[in-house]
Amino acid sequence: MAMSEVVDGSYRTPRAEHARVADAMRHGILKCPADASLRDAARTMCTEHVHMIVVTSPTDGSVVGSLSDMALLDALLDPGVAERPLGELAQRDVEMISSDAPLRQAATTMRDRGVAHMVVRDAHNGHPVGVLSTLDVAGILAWGEA
């Protein structure tokens, strides 16, 4: 069967039992500096259609924390929150996982810790290279056939 004739699933997407985090993750890190405004973060999230961004140090670019869409709800419900810099609003305990970890391990961690996103680190150098979300996991369940 030619690749163009593949009907069910994808020849490139592995089944959940064979998938690694790198197979499902979104490559690249969307970020805002800790001294940015909540409005800046909201614009980045809306423009890129994501529910979480990484908050970085304005001096060296290191990861300070993460900001989820739930923080945007807080800002809507508590106008004083919108005036605070991202560094004060960021969740400090950022869940991270290696790109070569089994996807099932990531799913277990996400479920057990009640998180919908994890920052993915490169398996070789440890640098952040992407984000894994529950929707990314769903994509493997939906399309994984290899």
Image: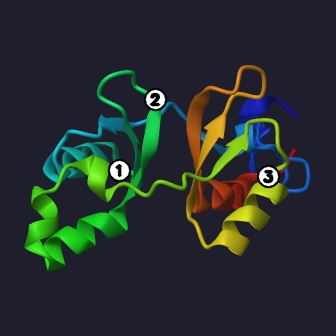
Residue at image coords 82%, 43%: 101
- Residue for badge 3: 103
Q: Residues within 10 Å of mark 1 (few under 14, many from 20)?
A: few
Q: Using residue 62 as the reference point, say whether residue 96 is left or right of it.
A: right
Q: Using residue 92 as the reference point, say whether residue 85 is left or right of it.
A: left
Image quadrant in which you'd find residue 11? top right
Image quadrant in which you'd find residue 14? top right
Q: Using residue 12 as the reference point, say whether residue 127 is left or right of it.
A: left
Q: Residues within 10 Å of mark 3 (few under 14, many from 20)?
A: many
* Cα–Cα span, label 1 and label 2: 23 Å
Q: Sequence-wise, which precedes: disc 3 or disc 1?
A: 1
Quadrant in which the N terminus is drawn: top right
Residue at image coords 83%, 58%: 104
Q: Residues within 10 Å of mark 2 (few under 14, many from 20)?
A: few
From the viewer's side, name the closer residue of 60 and 77: 60
Image location of residue 21, percent across then percent down: 74, 44
Image location of residue 90, percent across then percent down: 36, 54
Residue at image coords 43%, 58%: 91
- Residue for badge 1: 49
Name the mark nearer the viewer: 3 or 1.
3
* Cα–Cα span, label 2 and label 3: 26 Å
In what element is the residue under mark 3? Answer: helix
Query: Considering only vertical position in the picture, is 49 above or below 28?
Result: below
Q: Sequence-wise, which precedes: disc 2 or disc 3?
A: 2
Amino acid identity at mark 3:
Leu
Residue at image coords 29%, 40%: 34
In what element is the residue under mark 2? Answer: loop
